[in-house]
Image (cartoon, rainbow, N blue to C red):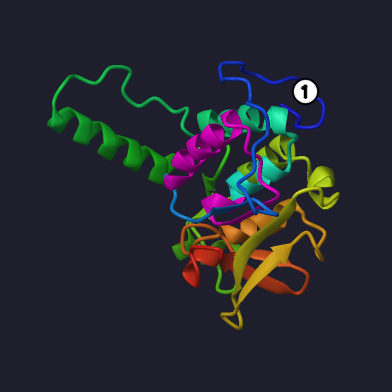
Amino acid sequence: MDARTSQPTHQTHQPPARSWRPERCDRVALVLQGGGALGAYQAGVYQALHEAGIEPDWVTGVSIGAINSAIIAGNRPEKRLDALRVFWERITNRKIWHYTPDGDIFRQWRNLTSAWMTSAMGQPGFFTPHQVNPWFSPVGARTATSYYDTTPLKESLRELVDFDLINEKKVRFAVGAVNVLSGNFIYFDNAHDEIEPEHIMASGALPPALPMVRIGTDHFWDGGIVSNTPL
């Protein structure tokens, strides 16, 4: 689905209520922190806000929260839920067990099997293993610093996020990352930066699993290394 041209894939959510804003509140900000699977919860929180007629004026995130933030800010309100649903269904699509018998032991084995498969094969639409294990990569090679390649995430972002819309600045947008060399935390903010997929990927580049991302002459890692909640 192209966020700029395609029609929504699903229409199962409730239509938004009339827009509402708290009294004496000039701006509504949505802050989404890092935390992997917490991102699925964040998508549900946004759905509740949307259905209550509350749309953010400012969205900021770190790590998985940066990805959700980009999908929200990079789509018009009527398309945001569908884009979030496409992303989350895509990265959780792999079915290891088609049927799970009742009981804790079976659920534990299912979860363990799923974790093994993700470690070995990556996550659809998110990351894939490097062809060469980092332990066997030449010193200084890009593949020597991470186990996975995040090219699939870049493709998902280009498909589901309208970066032209983000850079129109109708919604304030910022994501946090950490400079690898200095260790300093930095915000990439559409108030003064031209936001691209690499900014989102940098915010979620958690070592040693995921590779650092080069922006300009610097390299960046996951913002959660320094500050997991982008306040």
**Residue drawn at x 66%, y 38% as measured from the top left:** 156
- Between 94 and 72, the one lying in front of the other is 72
**Quarter the N terminus occupies:** top right
What residue span does the magenta drawing correspond to?
38-66
**Residue drawn at x 82%, y 43% as measured from the top left:** 165
**Residue drawn at x 71%, y 45% as measured from the top left:** 73
In this rendering, position of residue 11 left or right of residue 214: left
Residue 121 x/y as whole percent: 45, 40
Q: Is residue 213 visible?
A: yes
Indicate whether 23 appears above or below 86. below
Residue 147 x/y as whole percent: 48, 56
Residue 111 x/y as whole percent: 28, 36
**Residue drawn at x 57%, y 31% as measured from the top left:** 52
* Location of mark 1 (residue): 6
- Between 104 and 153, the one lying in front of the other is 104
Looking at this view, name the residue that lies furthest to the bottom.
182
Residue 35 x/y as whole percent: 43, 53
Which SS class for mark 1? loop
